[in-house]
Image: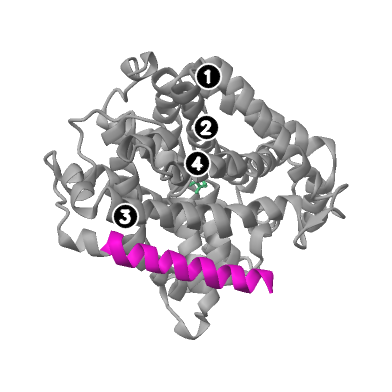
Amino acid sequence: MSLETKQREQWGSRVAFILAAAGSAVGLGNIWRFPYVVGTNGGAAFVIIYLFIIALIGYPMMVTEMAIGQKTKRNAIGAFRDLAPNTPWWVAGALGVLAGFVILSFYSVVAGWTLSYFFKTLAGDLGVGTDFVGTFIGHITSDWAPLFWHFVFMGLTLGIIGLGVVKGIEKTVKILMPALFVLLIALVGRALTLPGAGAGVEFLIKPDFSKITAQSILGAVGQAFFTLSLGMGCMITYGSYLDDKENINDNAAWVVGLDTAVALIAGFAIFPAVFALGFDPAAGGGLAFITLPAVFASMPGGTIFGAAFFLLLAVAALTSAISLLEVVVAYYIDEKGWSRQKASLIIGTLIFILGIPASLSMGRWSGFTILGYNFFDFLDFLQESILLPVGGLLTAIFAGYVWSAKKTREHSNINKSAIRLGTWFDVLIMYVSPIAVSVVMVTGLVDKLK
Ligand code: VAL
């Protein structure tokens, strides 16, 4: 056992763990991505399918990743090595570490946009009459401003990770997660009291199943992995700092529940406002940066609520970004013996550097493409279509057949918990998850590459 293992930090309390893991899960995926994916997939019917996927695939995968971490007390790669020594199963963890690295590079670029939009809104630069499309395109295609905010955001992220699990991650989430909930509730309150908000609520609760296509089901599985931070090593790494006497089943349910609640509440904060003011719910990735600023500009108290919204996005992004960086940093600390400070600085800098072409590919370097994607979209394609599904598939097969569903379940059932895993868990992890993820991956790839 190495020195690092003996001195491995632990969460100060159960609540700290839940807040950190929920902080990882709740991010741009919930507040930026979920509403626009719902918007482009027709609303309520998509939400229902998504909820089924969260329950049948998301929860069992969350339990599995946390259990692997808690059992081994290792980083994502070391954990697989520990459970299956001298086998190539460590590759499953390596995909997670790579996913953490790749996702954070472009995630930080988008998080940078939110910081910039927070200050723009606060300064009153996004008032009535602004060309919202032009402002957004102008911002993301410029060279320096997005890079500056990407730099600031990565600096914050690596600063927190450099401080450690308790003094860095735990302290941050204990302040930021409650703040996030307060901001979110204030925004929903504002949106629901706008005249005409009812149409937005209806869009989210009245399903029209004719809008569902094979693509929307694929989208729902991809969204579930991304939003729950699955397949990227986060939950294995965070689980590895969890005391053996803490239960997994209920904690995982809390994290999945909080993440789903935030996504739905974000929907209820956004669509009523979009409908009340006559905007298009299917605006895609520009929903948060083009449609919403227009919505805020035209509603009473818009400056304050607009600034609150972008602050909410930035906070949510930060508590997710630290978990992505921690995945990679934990690997270098455990396996390569690096100090935490050295690992945070070097890995954080490398991720910042990878984000530079991602940011520039929106503008100056847009002509450079891989498989028809600009660099930013290529990284997104890589994580969504390859790293997360392959990593998730291998993890499910590993837990179901190598470590064995029975042992995974028994480990998760060791401590007292309200939820007890029965043989239904074995069915979900051995058959449902691997089959669903394989189908999604193959169909998605065929579709994207044709
Ligand atoms: N789960 C987070 C999100 O939804 C990150 C870590 C991808 O934004």
| Colour scheme employed for the rendering of this structure | one colour
- In the depicted structure, whether residue 46 falls above or below residue 319: below
Front residue (pair 429, 246): 429
Question: What is the C-alpha distance between the residues marked 1 and 3?
Answer: 30 Å
Quadrant of the image for the N terminus?
A: top left
Label 2 and label 3: CA atoms lie apart by: 24 Å
Horizontally, residue 202 falls left or right of residue 423, namely right
Is residue 20 something one can see in this rendering? no
Q: Label 4 amino acid?
A: Ala
Which residue is label 2 attached to?
A: 328
- Of mark 1 and mark 3, the one earlier in the sequence is 3
Residue 113 visible to the viewer: yes
Residue hosting label 4: 94
Q: Residue 162 carries which label?
A: 1
For the view shown, which residue lies furthest in the bottom direction?
210
Work out whether 195 lies above or below 189.
Answer: below
The C terminus lies in quadrant: bottom right
Q: Which segment did they paint magenta?
A: 428-450
Circle nearer the N terminus (2, 1): 1
Which SS class for mark 2? helix
Q: How far apart are marks 4 and 3 (CA)?
A: 22 Å
Based on the displayed image, in which of its 4 quarters is residue 341 positioned?
A: top right
**Front of the two marks 2 and 1:** 2
Give coordinates of residue 306: x percent, y percent: 62, 46
| Tag 3: amino acid | Tyr
Asked if the magenta segment contains residue 100, the reply would be no
Q: Nearer the viewer, residue 76 or 292?
A: 76
> Can you give x and y, in whole percent of width and height, for residue 231 in the image?
45, 49
Disc marking residue 59: 3
Which mark sits nearer the N-terminus, 1 or 4?
4
